[in-house]
């Protein structure tokens, strides 16, 4: 008998109730596969239960570690998890970026070998795209990959490798044919980071943290069988991977598992922080900003749902650029408004006069500046929208 969506919802609710540990039902660390980060007992239990059920990647086929669910069922699981505040069991570039790319472009052997590992969170994945002379102009990349028997030997470097020091594997765009034009002769290949030819050097930020690294390849070895999507086809395959990344940032990826943080409502923040005797003009302008943002956020959410419903593939294509630009704007505006509402309490760096959520907001504000840069800057997304969505002529043809 075919199960109705309501029956599926109730069954999922019951399963989550029975299987999600109590400590997972609040914000906290979400595993992303790194073998170098020890997991709590509950994180390990949750990951193993969720991956056995196929719910770390619910829409992937069962043979590859998923549950073979459709998009509507996927959304039901997301809603039911949010209902109890459950954190996803797994996130990261494995299930969200390279996983869907292997699913779309991999050979049968690559799918059987890699997809179940991604789904179980076996290995933390880094992204090797940017180089010192190849950021927005990504096709300028120079990391060389030379054929050597069954392998490629890699020489060169990547930069801004997020989580580099914790990575086990890195998917890299590599120049496999330097004689071809800039956009040709590139391949996407999977590289084991635990080998003598790969060296990672953290880049220290002003905050003292080192979320990014430089990654050096000195005769590093990658297997030919780990080249995804065909030799010298990396520009098309790599761009599709970027759409998977942007669809995660834009909240419309139904292939992996997205993290969705529960944000405090701006109205609640205003009630807590705005003194009753607030200058009416300030109050009016803040109220207008809060209202506009809440309305825009609702419209954005509805647009996400419409895009998901209309997309046949596991992630939309060009719509990801639009959603990434607008998502970045709304996220940055939300934090700006939150800071404006909190006044000095929203700008603390250290000291007893700030509680932990207030201190966290300052670092969140700093981090939020990067949203319009990573995964391709907002300017580059606008170029894509102008050329590929609106069909506007570019400078040269104008
Ligand atoms: C938090 C964070 C995490 C990251 N993680 C990774 C990672 O894990 N792996 C990885 O490979 N990379 C990563 N990156 C790098 C990221 O992809 C690049 O920073 C981004 O693509 C921009 O490249 P760039 O920094 O070289 O800037 P540039 O390309 O030098 O751009 C500088 C400025 O010029 C503008 N610009 C450049 N070209 C144009 C144009 N044609 N039209 C209009 N404006 C233009 C840009 O919009 C930008 O404002 C990360 C970046 C950040 C901030």
Image (tube, rainbow, N blue to C red):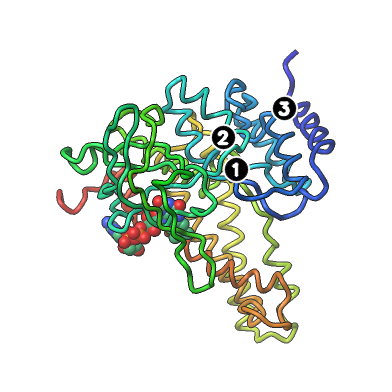
Residue 132 position, x and y percent, is 31, 58
Viewer-proximal residue among 9 and 358:
358
Residue 76 position, x and y percent, is 69, 35
Q: CA distance from mark 2 to mark 1?
A: 8 Å
Ligand 1 quadrant assignment: bottom left
Earlier sequence position, callout 2 versus callout 1 = 1
Seen at 58% across and 28% down, the residue is 116
The total of numbered circles placed on residues is 3
Tag 3 near tag 1, CB within 8 Å = no
| Numbered tag placed on residue 118 in the rendering | 2
Viewer-proximal residue among 211 and 286:
211
Seen at 51% across and 54% down, the residue is 165
Up the image or down, 329 lies above or below 23; here it is below
Foreground mark, 3 or 2, reads 2
The answer to whether the residue bearing label 3 lies less than 8 angstroms from the nearest atom of ligand 1 is no
Q: CA distance from mark 3 to mark 2?
A: 28 Å
Q: Residues within 10 Å of mark 1 (few under 14, many from 20)?
A: many
Which residue in the structure is indicated by mark 1?
Answer: 33
């Amino acid at each position: 008998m075919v199960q109705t969506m309501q029956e599926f919802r109730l069954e999922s609710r019951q399963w989550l109730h029975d299987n999600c540990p109590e400590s997972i039902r609040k914000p906290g660390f979400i595993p992303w596969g790194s073998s170098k980060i020890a997991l709590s007992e509950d994180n390990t239990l949750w990951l193993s239960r969720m991956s056995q059920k196929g719910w770390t990647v619910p829409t992937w086929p069962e043979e590859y570690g998923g549950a073979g669910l459709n998009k509507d069922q996927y959304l039901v699981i997301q809603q039911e998890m949010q209902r109890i505040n459950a954190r996803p069991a797994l996130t990261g570039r494995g299930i969200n970026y390279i996983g869907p790319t292997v699913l779309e472009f991999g050979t049968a052997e690559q799918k059987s070998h890699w997809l179940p590992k991604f789904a179980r969170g076996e290995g933390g994945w880094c992204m090797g795209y940017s180089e010192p002379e190849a950021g927005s102009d990504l096709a300028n990349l120079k990391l060389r990959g030379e054929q050597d028997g069954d392998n490629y030997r890699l020489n060169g470097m990547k930069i801004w490798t997020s989580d580099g020091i914790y990575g086990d594997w890195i998917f890299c765009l590599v120049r496999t044919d330097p004689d071809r034009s800039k956009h040709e002769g590139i391949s996407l290949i999977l590289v084991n980071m635990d080998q003598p030819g790969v060296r990672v050097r953290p880049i220290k930020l002003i905050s003292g943290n080192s979320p990014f690294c430089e990654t050096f390849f000195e005769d590093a070895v990658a297997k030919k069988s780990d080249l995804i999507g065909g030799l010298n086809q990396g520009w098309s395959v790599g761009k599709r991977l970027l759409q998977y990344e942007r669809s995660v940032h834009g909240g419309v990826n139904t292939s992996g598992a997205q993290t969705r943080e529960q944000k405090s409502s701006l109205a609640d923040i205003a009630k807590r922080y705005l003194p009753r005797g607030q200058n009416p003009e300030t109050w009016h302008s803040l109220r207008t900003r809060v209202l506009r943002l809440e309305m825009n956020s609702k419209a954005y959410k509805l647009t996400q749902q419409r895009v998901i419903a209309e997309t046949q593939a596991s992630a939309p294509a060009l719509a990801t650029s639009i959603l990434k630009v607008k998502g970045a704007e709304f996220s940055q505006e939300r934090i700006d408004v939150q800071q404006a509402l909190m006044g000095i309490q929203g700008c603390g760096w250290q000291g007893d006069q700030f509680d932990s959520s207030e201190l966290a907001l300052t670092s969140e504000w700093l981090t939020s500046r990067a949203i319009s840069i990573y995964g391709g800057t907002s300017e580059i997304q606008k170029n894509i929208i102008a050329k590929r969505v609106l069909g506007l002529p570019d400078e040269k043809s104008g």
